[in-house]
Amino acid sequence: MSGREGGKKKPLKAPKKNAKEMDDDDMAFKQKQKEDQKAMEALKAKASGKGPLTGGGIKKSGKK
């Protein structure tokens, strides 16, 4: 038993995957995702200017 054999062995590197070719459906799906992302960011920017949404509930004062 030599000293180099002990310990955890390193896993072999997985080969790189080839870039798959995208057809029209994939391209349309990616485009739709980008548009949805842009719409969400626009809504976030619009909503950030306003105050919090939870403000209409029953407010309790500290007095009794």
Image: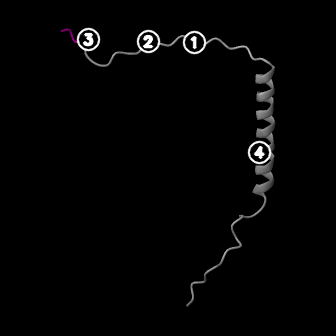
Q: Give the residue displayed 72% in from the left and 64% down from the top.
A: 53
Q: Are marks 3 and 2 in contact (CB under 8 Å)?
A: no
Of residue 3 and residue 32, the one placed in the foreground of this image is: 32
Q: How is the image coloured?
A: one colour
Identity of the residue furthest to the bottom in this view? 64
The disc at residue 5 is 3
Dot 1 alpha-carbon crowd within 10 angstroms: few under 14, some 14 to 19, many 20 or more: few
* For marks 3 and 4 on the same chain, the one whose residue lies earlier in the sequence: 3
Where on the picture, by quarter, is residue 39? top right
Residue located beneath label 4 in the image: 40
Return the x and y of residue 2 as percentages of the image width and height: 20, 9
- Residue 53 higher or lower than 6, as above or below: below
Residue located beneath label 1 in the image: 16
Identity of the residue furthest to the front in this view? 25
Where on the picture, by quarter, is residue 50? bottom right
* For marks 3 and 2 on the same chain, the one whose residue lies earlier in the sequence: 3
What is the three-letter code of the residue carrying label 1?
Lys
Dot 2 alpha-carbon crowd within 10 angstroms: few under 14, some 14 to 19, many 20 or more: few
Q: Are marks 2 and 1 in contact (CB under 8 Å)?
A: no
Count the labels in the image.
4
The residue stretch that appears in magenta: 1-5
Q: Gap between marks 2 and 1, in whole Å?
A: 12 Å
- Image quadrant holding the C terminus, namely bottom right
Q: Gap between marks 3 and 2, in whole Å?
A: 16 Å
Q: Give the residue displayed 60% in from the left and 83% down from the top.
A: 61
Q: Gap between marks 3 and 1, in whole Å?
A: 28 Å
Dot 3 alpha-carbon crowd within 10 angstroms: few under 14, some 14 to 19, many 20 or more: few
* For marks 2 and 4 on the same chain, the one whose residue lies earlier in the sequence: 2
Say which of marks 3 and 2 sits in front: 2
What is the three-letter code of the residue carrying label 2?
Leu
